[in-house]
Amino acid sequence: PHIQDPYSKRLQTKLIETLETAAVFRDEVQVLKKAGKVGGIPCPPIKDMMQEICEWLSNRPDEPLVLAHGDLHLKNILVRRRGAGYSFRFIDPNSAIGFTDPLYDIGKLLHWAEELGWSQIDEDSCEVSWTCSPTSWSLSAHINAPMSAEQRRQRLESTIMKLVKPLMKSPDDNRRLQLSIAAAHAGLLHLYATAGNSKMARFATYYTLRSLLRWRMAT
């Protein structure tokens, strides 16, 4: 397939519909229609932000498409030492993605390299707080992992961003990258919510919304 916009449908189904229907979010469904804060940063109603995203994507010129792996997270990369160097092999591609935005795979990779990756390693290190009032809401999260391990994660994220930097030639490229990361985060959010893991579903929601706010604020 050829998919010019791999983001809006995924965000609609994995983020919006999950927040609307998942039992773990029954107390937070108001965030779809009310403004709040994510990590202290003002966040518009999520449905309003989703509408902004769809309009922005629909008004953009078509991007040259590339054949994507479709599920390029860290568990799908095999690394072997060969002499003085290494060899890499990518496994389990998602054939449903086909040809799409070249930033799609990069977002998937950063999805695991960001702090949300800790949810796959040590759930106890993941802290999240979501408070709601009749008029607003506030969502925050942080990592309580060993400093040395978190520094290694930060180096990985920094290394990936250095490799990506030559591809980021305009503010629009950065905005597309943030949507790609958010779409990947939303997939994990959906999996946690479906499994009934309310803590990790909220933790993933924080990072999904953080990426969407970065999209919104990018210039």
Image (cartoon, grey):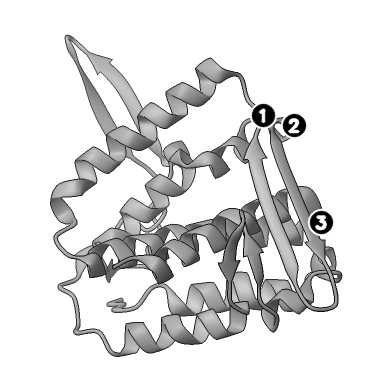
Instruction: Give the residue number, with chain letter if any, for mark 3.
Output: 196
Q: Nearer the viewer, residue 88 or 147?
A: 147
Q: Secondary structure at mark 1?
A: loop
Q: Quadrant of residue 157?
A: top left
Crowd rating for badge 3 (residues with CA inside 10 Å; few <14, some 14–19, many 20+)? some
Q: Nearer the viewer, residue 183 or 95?
A: 183
Query: Residue 20, relative to residue 71: is it above or below?
Result: below
- Residue at point 28% right, 90% down? 59
Front tag of 3 and 2: 2
Q: Secondary structure at mark 2?
A: helix
Q: Is residue 112 among the parts visible in the rendering?
A: yes
Front tag of 2 and 1: 1
Query: Residue 40, relative to residue 109: is it above or below?
Result: below
Spot occupied by residue 66 in the image (x, y as percentages of width and height): 19, 65
Q: Secondary structure at mark 3?
A: loop
What number is the disc on residue 124?
A: 2
- Residue at point 62% right, 31% down? 121
- Residue at point 24% right, 62% down? 102
- The CA distance from mark 1 to mark 3 is 23 Å
Instruction: Give the residue number, with chain letter if any, for mark 1.
Output: 144
